[in-house]
Amino acid sequence: MERNPHFFKVLLGDFSQRLASRCLHFLFGIPVQFLKHISTATSKRVTLQGPSGRYWNAELGKSSKGTFLCGGWAEFTEDHALREYEFLVFRYDGDFTFTVKIFGVNACEREDLFTVSQRKRRKLCEVNDRYVESSLDVGCVLLSSQFVIHEERSEAQEAANSFTSKFPFTTVKLCRYHIRHPYIMKLPSAFSHTHLPRKKSVLIIKDPNMKSWEVTFIPPKGDNDRLSAGWHDFFRGNDLMLGDFCVFELVKPLQLNVHIFR
């Protein structure tokens, strides 16, 4: 069984800020030994999945002193009210996507973050010598010596993050290991450990057309719970692709309705 690489960070100092343009030092660096698992291009957009199963965008930056998270990292720290000396574990899921687990100073996972979502923010972007307001979901880029507004999140991600239900649910962005051998779907532990049985079980998952599929749920020790046998049939039957978002909604003890956003 393929295992995804992990690294951890203890939050120290002014960890919430992005790259400081004048002093050129990184404040949330990625370990050098970890870089073999990811591309080290000068700038890449990355996706951070928080304990709630929702997603935040950030940037992967590089300087002479290392490779680091910047851009939306400041919003991620603010939304999760991160504090000094807390402990974060990053699992790399491929395609510039990280799943982040957050542990408090008491060494226990912060359960208060299982329901966190993005806060709405307003900021100013300069367009043709005037300033206009934009929300959290838009950013500014330099183009032809002007600042123009562009969408920072895909419509699929925004739709998935906007999903609400009276039932428990979690969101997963499809990465390479979801759609290749051995064809498994890892579920966020904050969701599965709370709502799914702690033994091997057969679950019914229903696609957006309410067609039923049987999948095997496996809760291994020391790793994320996963959907195994039957998952391959489900994603082929629903033409799932890399980058799609699936919201798993637990409507009955052993039934998940799956909402697909692409």
Image: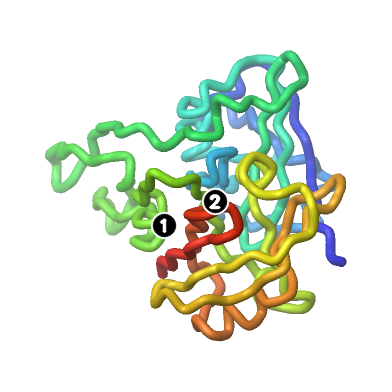
Vertical side of 177 occupied by 103: above or below: above
The residue beneath circle 1 is: 157
The residue positioned 49% from the left and 30% from the top of the image is: 74
Please tell me how crowded label 1 is: few (under 14), some (14-19), or many (20+) other residues with Cα within 10 Å.
many
Residue 208 in the image: x percent, y percent?
Answer: 41, 72
Which of the 4 image quadrants contains residue 180?
Answer: bottom right
Q: Nearer the viewer, residue 225 or 199?
A: 199
Q: Residue at x 72, y 15 (%)?
A: 105
Residue 192: x, y in percent?
A: 65, 47
| Disc 2 crowd, CA 10 A, few/some/many (<14, 14-19, 20+) | many
Helix, strand or loop for disc 1: helix
Q: Which residue is mark 2?
A: 47
Label 2 vs label 1: CA separation?
Answer: 10 Å
Which amino acid does the dot numbered 1 rest on? Gln
> Number of labelled discs?
2
- Helix, strand or loop status at disc 2: strand
What scheme was used to colour the molecule?
rainbow
The answer to whether 194 is drawn above or below residue 111 in the figure is below
Whether label 2 touches label 1, CB < 8 Å:
yes
Q: Residue drawn at (65%, 15%), measured in percent from left and top?
A: 84
Residue visible at 61% across and 44% down?
A: 195
Q: Return the mark for residue 57.
A: none
Q: Nearer the viewer, residue 69 or 48?
A: 48
Q: Is residue 117 visible?
A: yes
Residue 206 image point, x, y percent: 49, 70
Toward the front, the furthest residue is 253
Q: Counting residues from the N terminus, which is met first, the one under dot 2 or under dot 1?
A: 2
